[in-house]
Image: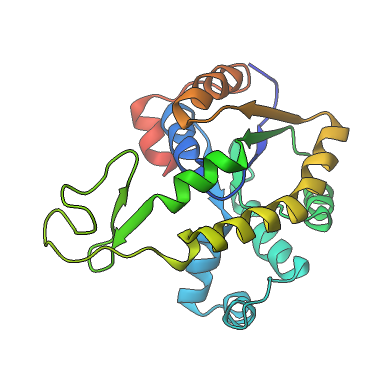
Amino acid sequence: MAVGLLRAVIMGPPGSGKGTISTRILKHFALKHLSSGDLLRDNMQKRTEVGVIAKSYIDQGQLIPDDIMTRLMLSELKTLNRYHWLLDGFPRTVPQAEALDKACEIGTVIDLDLPFETIKQRLTARWIHPASGRVYNLEFNPPKVPGTDDITGEPLVQRDDDKPETVVKRLKAYETQTKPVLDYYRKKGVLESFSGTETNMIWPPVHAFLQTKLPEASQKEAATQR
């Protein structure tokens, strides 16, 4: 068990399975998970000062400036001082990474390295039933009748985010914006990349790696991390 509290970041392109891997990490290890997306949504819903400012950028289709994201995340991290934690969705730019470094030392960056073609196939195969939020994947769990929800028989739709042309744009944007962050952490010697084409292939080495850094959580402890 490494001395001190773990300060970790998980990174990966949209559709790389970050959510699934993060959920499994929480189930197995005693740590807190802080998602920038969840925190943003919470602040926008509560109409906090940062939430209102962030929403104004999102509504205009613009990226939220580094200083606003940094202020939001660092403020929340202060409440987690006593815990091991895992950051998800932050930092996304080098200035954000540099600001985070001034507040605390990141010891581990988990990079989920999947081929873009695999991610493109995975995301464009995703269809949803808008009323219930049920998600289908044409490869893994297709609907019984093509194009319709299993329970209601209503038509399925593909989110704009999952349309092929949008997926390609999202992946290119991730590569442009986030590759410098990966390089930044690689130079610091804290980047651990896990490659594969499926979440179930990537998870065992991630789990084995974290066992060298963290105590395994009991079921009771794991439940309190969520």
Q: Quadrant of the C terminus?
A: top left
The residue drawn where x is 62% and y is 27% is: 195
Residue 16 appears in the figure: no
- Between 136 and 94, the residue placed more toward the observer is 136
Left or right? Give the position of 156 relative to 55.
left
Q: Is residue 53 left or right of residue 141?
A: right
Image point 78% across, 56% down: which residue? Answer: 96
Residue 65 spot, x, y in % from top left: 74, 71
The vertical placement of 133 against 220, above or below, is below
Residue 124 lies left or right of residue 16; in this view the side is left
Q: Name which quarter of the figure residue 182 lies in.
A: top right
Q: How many marks?
A: 0
Residue located 71% across and 65% down the image: 71
Q: Position of residue 62 (x, y in %)?
A: 67, 76
Colour basis: rainbow
Residue located at (70% from left, 28% from top): 192
Asked where in the image residue 133 lies, by quadrant, the reply is: bottom left
Looking at the image, the residue that sits furthest to the left is 152
The part of the image, by quadrant, that contains residue 3 is: top right
Query: Looking at the image, is 110 positioned above or below residue 150?
Result: above
Residue 79 picture location, percent across and down: 60, 53
The answer to whether residue 109 of the structure is visible from this angle is yes
Residue 98 coordinates in the image, percent (x, y): 84, 51
Name the quarter where the N terminus is drawn: top right
